[in-house]
């Protein structure tokens, strides 16, 4: 049976608006221009890399590592306040139903996300018990398109990469899946990415892959 590894944000839940609001609040406070177009460049990359992208428009003195850490913590505190408003209703019915069917068919399910807030989000939306393994920003040192998060997810599942199907909405995520030697399924934005092995429009289409 194939193992499925899911990105979290943009695939199972949608917290892009929270990321944007939190980064915008921080950027406005320090006087750096930030808009939704810049925010789109942050998808699928680490918090530290996201901050560096935002600071491309910084015109002050170079910031120290400690100052950057403080900015990331400020953003994350705002983000977690917004995440705390999430409920199980934030998971679409077809997502929850599809995961349930895949699990009942005997497929192993894992999360492969760069977010350090993964476990908190899963708890808020009542998805924690669905997954056999969680690989996230707390156990990796390199973010997508590096394949580390997916390779570790496969290791946690006890599966070989060629037996894993990765479901991703970001181009960087598909690149990471391919680099890991896994099948990359594109959904959302990644459904238009030519490097995706399979492209789907609806989450429930995964049931055709998991027969």
Image (cartoon, rainbow, N blue to C red):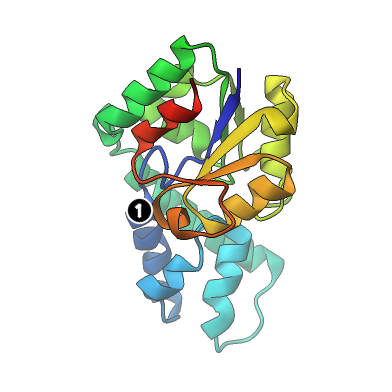
Horizontally, residue 189 falls left or right of residue 106, namely: left
**Residue at left 73%, top 42%?**
181
Q: Secondary structure at mark 1?
A: helix
Which image quarter: residue 71? bottom right
Q: Using the image, determine if residue 151 lies above or below residue 10.
A: above
Question: Which quarter of the rendered picture does the N terminus lie within?
Answer: top right
Q: Using the image, determine if residue 173 lies above or below residue 26.
A: above
In this view, the residue in front, 110 or 73, is 110
In this view, the residue in front, 178 or 60, is 178
Query: Whole-percent x and y of residue 159?
Result: 72, 23
Q: Residue furthest bottom?
A: 59
Which image quarter: residue 124? top left
Horizontally, residue 142 falls left or right of residue 28, namely: right
- Counting labels gives 1
Task: Say whether residue 46 is visible.
Answer: no
Query: Whole-percent x and y of residue 146?
Result: 71, 53
Other-residue count near label 1 (Cα within 10 Å), few / some / many at <14 / 14–19 / ≥20 = some
Query: Whole-percent x and y of residue 110?
Result: 57, 27
**Residue at left 64%, top 54%?**
175
Task: Say whether residue 77 is visible.
Answer: yes
Horizontally, residue 88 falls left or right of residue 143, namely: left
Query: Whole-percent x and y of residue 140?
Result: 71, 42
**Residue at left 52%, top 21%?**
131
In this view, the residue in front, 150 or 127, is 150
The residue under label 1 is 18
Which image quarter: residue 30? bottom left
Q: Using the image, determine if residue 33 lies above or below residue 40.
A: below
């Amino acid at each position: 049976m194939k193992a499925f590894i899911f990105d979290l944000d943009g695939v199972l839940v949608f917290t892009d608006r929270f990321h944007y609001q939190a980064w915008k609040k921080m950027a406005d406070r320090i006087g750096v221009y930030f808009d939704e177009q810049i925010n789109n460049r942050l998808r699928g990359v680490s918090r530290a890399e996201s901050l560096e992208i935002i600071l491309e428009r910084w015109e002050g003195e170079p910031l120290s590592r400690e100052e950057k850490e403080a900015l990331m913590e400020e953003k994350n505190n705002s983000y977690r306040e917004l995440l705390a408003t999430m409920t199980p209703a934030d998971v679409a019915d077809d997502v929850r139903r599809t995961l349930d069917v895949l699990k009942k068919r005997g497929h192993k399910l894992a999360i492969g996300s760069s977010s350090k807030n993964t476990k908190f989000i899963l708890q808020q939306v009542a998805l924690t018990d669905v997954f056999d393994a969680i690989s996230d920003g707390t156990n990796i040192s390199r973010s997508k398109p590096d394949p580390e998060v997916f390779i570790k997810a496969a290791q946690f599942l006890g599966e070989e990469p060629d037996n894993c199907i990765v479901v991703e909405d970001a181009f960087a995520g598909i690149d990471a899946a391919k680099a890991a030697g896994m099948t990359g399924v594109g959904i959302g934005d990644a459904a238009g990415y030519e490097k995706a092995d399979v492209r789907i429009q609806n989450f429930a289409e995964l049931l055709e892959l998991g027969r």
